[in-house]
Amino acid sequence: MNSAINILITLDIHCYPYTEKKIPLWIQETLQLLDNLCIEATFFFPAVLAEKFSTYVRMILERGHEIACHGLTHGPEEQYNLMPYEKQKAI
């Protein structure tokens, strides 16, 4: 009996706690690794970074991966697991 297992691979792209300068290199290295392993993934970007790194968003899409929204800004102050529901809605 041959059965397939589906696995969802997701990656979060945001600055905190890293600097924006490292994001392009990280994306390029990650894309190369995923290509080598023949894996497709979903990359979650905050809207502000998707705009800022639109070239890399297109590069990710061209390699067969998916882009998803990870909030508007997703800064270090946005710890949703600790935040009251009303504040989450407001953000």
Image: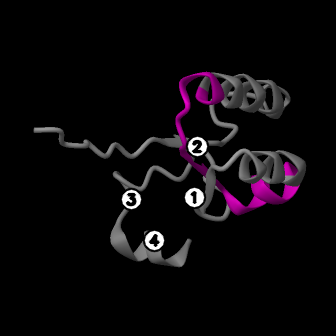
Q: Mark 1 and mark 4: span between their CA atoms? A: 17 Å
The answer to whether the residues at label 3 and label 2 have Cβ atoms under 8 Å apart is no
Going from N to C along the chain, the mark reached first, 1 or 2, is 1
The answer to whether the residues at label 3 and label 4 have Cβ atoms under 8 Å apart is yes
Q: Secondary structure at mark 4?
A: helix
**Residue pictured at 81% horizontal, 46% vertical:** 59
The answer to whether the residues at label 4 and label 2 have Cβ atoms under 8 Å apart is no
**Residue pictured at 60% horizontal, 63% vertical:** 69
Part of the protein shown in magenta: 34-53
Q: Mark 1 and mark 3: span between their CA atoms? A: 16 Å
Q: Mark 3 and mark 4: span between their CA atoms? A: 7 Å
Q: Position of residue 65 (x, y in %)?
A: 63, 49
Q: Secondary structure at mark 2?
A: loop
User: What's under tag 1, amino acid-wise?
Assistant: His
The residue that mark 3 highlights is: 83
User: What's under tag 3, amino acid-wise?
Assistant: Met
Q: Position of residue 89 (x, y in %)?
A: 46, 77
The answer to whether the residues at label 1 and label 4 have Cβ atoms under 8 Å apart is no
Residue 78, numbered label: none
For the C terminus, give its image quadrant: bottom right
Instruction: Please state if 77 lies on the left or on the right of 29 as rendered.
Output: left
The residue that mark 2 highlights is: 76
Residue 21, placed above or below residue 6:
above
Q: Secondary structure at mark 3?
A: loop
Q: Position of residue 85 (x, y in %)?
A: 35, 71
User: What's under tag 2, amino acid-wise?
Assistant: Pro
**Residue pictured at 73% horizontal, 46% vertical:** 60
Toward the front, the furthest residue is 1
